[in-house]
Amino acid sequence: MADFVFKGVIPPISTIFDEHCKFDPKGQAKLIDFLIERGVDGLFFLGSGGEFTQMSAEERKEVAAQVIAQVAGRVPVLIGTGSPNTREAIDLSVHAKEQGADGIVVINPYYWHLTEDNLRTYFTSIASAVSGLPMVLYNFPALTGQDLTPQFVASLVQECPNIVGIKETLDNIGHLTEMNRVVHAVNPNFAVFCGFDNHLLTNLLAGGAGVISASGNFAPQFTVNTYQNFVKGDFNEACKWHQYLLQVPRAYGLDSPFVNVVKEATVLCGLDIPTNVLPPTMPLKPEAKAQLKALLTELGLIK
């Protein structure tokens, strides 16, 4: 595989809150330790599953500082710093760098549909403000309303050497394979991560770096074993584990946003952490929780 800055399984980790919607460092540390012990290759905080959109800039800074200290260099830490406000995104990115993050993940502004020039300025301004710190783009057009095309990403990579990867969160395998093909022509070490669990093997076969998907919180064995066996060349074993990943997205339809689903699944799979979520998300309804439990049982995650 290419010499990626980041690679493998990097879960977009849930942010843990107490019953008063305040950050819960003890619960967060428990989830961090659990995932590191199970062999993940890094941790991504304050992504969509980390509820960054429901948090103030100061709350995001508090979480970033705490989790970087809690991980303490055991695995690479990526901090989500994107915002519709470029000044805020720069401020959060600089803060993450100062706290010792190994990299940042930057989603494009949502609400406005930007011209390509304005979108380019957004990303290049952030990359320039944290020169030397690796930056991963975050493409989630279903939520931002604007796709980052392979050609656009390739041009950014040529302009900003610290833009080293992208998280592709769209259910389009063709887009994923084209992103690998087009951007690798510019930089073979550019790391393409899939955001959908069930795209992991396709991404690896296309030359991608790995996966940043929600199941890593509650079933890291699925993604870790798929990735590690692929790297070893044991494709039969990789396919065996990937079959579980093909079924995982069924859980995400139980609510929207599904951050409550991920937290409930983590608890059902045996980790005692609070499942509190920030509004407008509500606790998972009993009937949805029953459906989730049935799926996790089907996948062999609980008995």
Image (cartoon, rainbow, N blue to C red):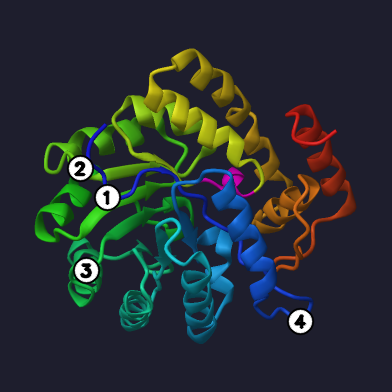
Q: Identify the amino acid type marked 4.
A: His
Q: Earlier in the sequence, mark 1 or mark 3?
A: 1
Q: Residues within 10 Å of mark 3 (few under 14, many from 20)?
A: many
Residue 5's mark?
A: 1
Which quarter shows the C terminus? Answer: top right
Q: Identify the amino acid type marked 3.
A: Ala
Determine whether 274 is above or below 215 in the image. below
Say which of marks 4 and 1 sits in front: 1
Residue 7 location, x and y as percent? 36, 44
Q: CA distance from mark 2 to mark 4?
A: 43 Å
Q: Earlier in the sequence, mark 1 or mark 2?
A: 1
Question: Residue at label 2?
Answer: 189
Say which of marks 2 and 4 sits in front: 2
Say how many tags the image has.
Answer: 4
Instruction: Find the magenta span and give its range.
Output: 213-217
Q: Secondary structure at mark 1?
A: loop
Residue 18 location, x and y as percent? 74, 75
Say which of marks 1 and 3 sits in front: 1
